[in-house]
Image: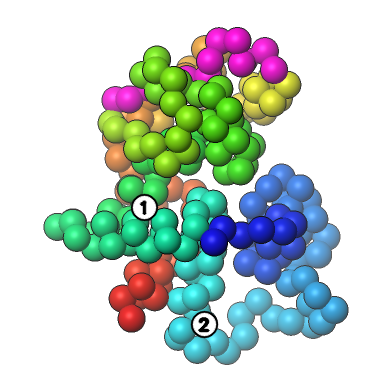
Amino acid sequence: MKFTGPRVRLSRRLGIPLTPKAIRYMERRPYPPGEHGANQRRSPKMSDYKRQLMEKQRLKAQYNLSERQLRNYVRKASRTTSNTETSLIRVLESRLDALVLRAGFARTIYAARQVVLHGHIRLNGRWVNIPSQRVKVKDVISVKADSRKIQPFQQALEEMVVSPPGYLDRNKEEMTAQLVYLPEREEVPVSCTVPLVIEYYSR
């Protein structure tokens, strides 16, 4: 199952802001939710299993994945001949909704999923509505011409003040982005200790 419920509460529980609202809220309350949240420490003594579980939950939330999806991605990455951590991040970062977010066409991974589902995104000029669609190197993601006029994309355009990661070549005015190469782990803005996730699924 995917996470449900308030995103701010989930963000506070995982210790990572998942939405712009969560960023503002966590600046005021940088502790877990609940009656005793302010008295909890962020780094209490944890068992190995609990640390692995927490990192797995953090990675799953940042890509808005179901348990089954993440398990399958880990299995796929472990079957490659290259480093499993790098392979896992690359397969996750090749998702269409993830790259829509990285390009700045959506403010959150949830919004990115929605704009893909609603048919606002084109891949190499073709209509696609599958958030998990794999994007290959040199593929071009674009916002449909008519869709650029609607409020979410107008707001996204105003907020495109930060350059995307180096593996994306973005044209701000035309709202297009090309995947230039598959990224290394350190290039991907994900807050997670990925080896612990791999260990969790290796049990």
Residue 111, placed above or below residue 28? above
In what quadrant of the picture does the C terminus appear? bottom left
Magenta segment: does it hold 145?
yes
In the image, residue 36 sits, relative to residue 105, either above or below, namely below
| Image location (x, y in percent) of residue 58 | 54, 63
Determine which quarter of the picture holds residue 157.
Answer: top right
Query: What residue lies at 45% left-to-right and 85% top-to-bottom?
Result: 48
Residue 9 location in percent, x, y? 74, 62
Q: At numbered mark 1, what does the secondary structure look like: helix, strand or loop?
A: helix
Q: Which of 99 and 39 is in front in this view?
A: 99
The residue tagged 1 is 89
Residue 159 percent coordinates (x, y): 67, 28
Where residue 127 appears, x then y in whole percent? 44, 20
Identify the mark at residue 50; answer none if there is no mark.
Answer: 2
| Left or right, 45 with reference to 185 | right
Regarding residue 164, the answer to whether it shows in the image is: no
Q: Quadrant of residue 17?
A: bottom right
Amino acid carrying mark 2 in the image: Lys
Residue ID at (14%, 57%): 81
| Residue 141 inside the magenta-drawn segment | yes
Q: How crowded is mark 1: few (under 14 residues within 10 Å), some or many (20 or more)?
A: many
Q: What stretch is highlighted in magenta?
A: 138-150
Amino acid beneath label 1: Ile
Q: Kindly report the distance in space between the C-alpha atoms of the residues bearing marks 1 and 2.
A: 22 Å
- Who's the residue at 57% across and 43% down the image? 109
